[in-house]
Image: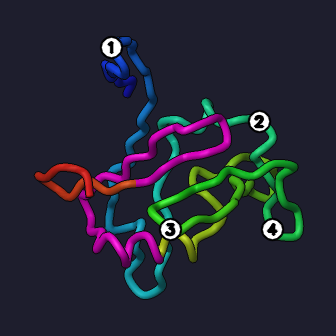
Amino acid sequence: MMYTLAVSTAGVSRSIEFMVYESVLTHGNFGKTVANNHFYITSFIHQLPADVFGGSTKDKPAPSKMLLEYGSLKTETDVPSTRAGKPRHFFRDRAFVGEFFRLTRAEPNDVVLLERVSDYHLRLSLKKQGSAAA
């Protein structure tokens, strides 16, 4: 979603546009017996820079990384691919996502909001089911 924010500083008004992507969490994002610790980026994967797509293992990283941040929690990660070279629809650093889930107390049906700060930087927040962003 594209948002426009009207800002007035020292008597000068201007508009700032920013993009916020959304990912609705499902039970599959958490896993039943093993923590999957991911959220889907399917709806905006085509808007990510081409050089953030890596290979199928950590030994084959992408040339560039995405900075994901939630408060002081930060990681630089890429998007893994299948062995056949098709991009997966989540970020590689699942430990970061697991910690984000823990800190926000994320549950199925909550919505991960990803504010696009720059081409390689996304700021995360969580909208609890039926509430404002956390």
Residue type at tag 4: Thr
Q: Which range is magenta?
A: 99-124
Going from the N terminus, do you reach mark 2 or mark 4 first?
Answer: 2
In the image, farthest residue toward the front? 10
Q: CA distance from mark 4 to mark 1?
A: 52 Å
Position above or below: 56 against 133: below
Q: Earlier in the sequence, mark 3 or mark 4?
A: 4
Badge 1 marks a residue whose secondary structure is loop
Q: Position of residue 31 (x, y in %)?
A: 41, 76
The single residue placed furthest to the left in the displayed view is 130
In the displayed structure image, the side of residue 113 where residue 105 appears, left or right: left
For disc 4, the marked residue is 57
Q: Which residue shows up at 33% across the image and 61% down it?
A: 26
- Ranked by sequence position, the earlier of labels 4 and 1 is 1
Front tag of 3 and 2: 3
Secondary structure of residue under mark 4: loop
Q: Is residue 132 left or right of residue 67?
A: left
Q: How is the image coloured?
A: rainbow
